[in-house]
Image: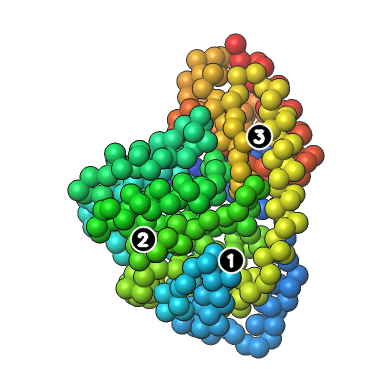
Amino acid sequence: MNSLSDRINRLSESQTLAMTRKSRELIAQGIDVINLSIGEPDFDTPDFIKDAAKKAIDDNFSHYAPVPGYQDLRDAISNKFKRDNGLDYSPDQIVVSTGAKHSIANVALALINPGDEVLLLSPYWVSYFEIVKLAEGKPIPVSAGIENDFKVTASQLEAAITDKTKLIVFSTPCNPSGSVFSEEELKAIADVVAAHEDLYVICDEIYEHIVFTGKHNSLAKFDHVKDRVITVNGVSKGFAMTGWRIGYIGAPAWIAKACTKIQGQFTSGASSISQKAAVAAVSADPSCTEEMRNTFKKRRDLILDLLKDLDGLKTNVPEGAFYVFADISSYFNRTHADTKIENATDLSMYLLNEASVALVPGDAFGEADYMRISYACSDEVINEAVKRIKAALNKLK
């Protein structure tokens, strides 16, 4: 008998983590799987950050930390917002959590009532949808196709807003598409939000340091909406610190206070040692991220060049993050041996079994005709992976 709550039975497993788990299981069986499903830099955490963590251990930062984060970290994040983003968040408007995912969940639980509608700019990061469901809200995808570089327009957003809309959630740079909203595009979104009282926005900026053209812009820079924007960021992507589990928000003080209240009952403060490492990361000159960003740009150019040889695959040019979100619908209704490809999930499982390459189907991100390909790996791995994918796709007739 299944005695689990309705809440957990409604919750779907993260498809990105599910593909990673399946890859690890196959690798454990001795199969040479290339995992292009995970959103994790293949770089190691910089030494100056590791040194800060070692010092924190030696200095006995091994006790409970304040629920919203150490004061010196919140001070450093406040300074970082001013320095890098032109945002004025005081330390009491900042809450440090166990990763940006935790930060988003805190905000959702703080703001969403049962039945509230939450607009997700699609394609969206996989966990947005499930976090909204967990908060008993109603996720409403608003889709932008590859022809629009996967960027929802202000007019589309306006058309989707109803009297039940409470929250908008999106990322820039975007996971899974790598799209980057320009200052003008964000200004247009801000104008729409400003016209609707009691409408709030979570702007997820975790890929801020991985922008290839132009510059990163923050929605909260616009004065007429800054009091209704929650800026989410962290150290995982830009500083190769995924395992350290540090994310944070800058938000109106009343929202930050609510998130601290929730966090106090769920997890208390984030890891004390990780927080001290994060002080070093966010205090550093952003130029320290340039080498990794330049490497990802070269890999982007490499994988796009290789993917051109895959007849039927359609891509755009992502401006940030480390993903290609490819239209793979031309492979639907094809077969090989006893396998028929009817959707993106079928194709991802076919490529895992036939090519030993793990990818994530687009359904996870709200777009059923697409596949997310991560290029957070070496040139050699990218070349081999695309070679395998091409061979497997060529077998489909």
Going from N to C along the chain, the mark reached first, 1 or 3, is 1
Q: Position of residue 323 (x, y in %)?
A: 61, 42
Kindly identify which residue carries mark 1: 84
In the picture, the disc for residue 208 is none
Image quarter (top left, top right, bottom left or bottom right) of the C terminus = top right
Q: Quadrant of residue 43?
A: bottom right
The residue drawn where x is 39% and y is 64% is 223
The residue that disc 3 covers is 357
| In this rendering, position of residue 131 left or right of residue 235 | left
User: Which secondary structure lies at badge 1?
Assistant: helix
User: Where is residue 116 drawn, in percent x and y?
Assistant: 24, 51
> Disc 1 versus disc 3: distance between alpha carbons?
37 Å
Looking at marks 1 and 2 on the same chain, the residue that comes earlier in the sequence is marked by 1
Point out the frontmost of discs 2 and 3.
2
Q: Spot the residue most to the top.
A: 397
At label 2, the amino acid type is Val
Above-or-below relation of 59 to 38: below
For the point 31% across and 65% down, which residue is it? 110
Whole-percent x and y of residue 250? 45, 68
Asked whether the viewer can see residue 133, the reply is no
* Image position of 160 (left or right of 229): left
Q: Is residue 327 left or right of residue 192?
A: right
**Residue flagged by tag 1: what amino acid is it?**
Asp
Q: Is residue 327 left or right of residue 251?
A: right
- Whether residue 301 is visible, yes or no, is yes
Q: Is mark 2 on a helix, strand or loop?
A: loop
**Residue 225 - label:** 2
Q: What element carries label 3?
A: strand
Mark 1 to mark 2 CA distance (whole Å):
19 Å
Q: CA–CA distance between discs 2 and 3?
A: 43 Å
Q: Residue 351 or 189: which is nearer the viewer? A: 189
Q: Which amino acid does label 3 sit on?
A: Val
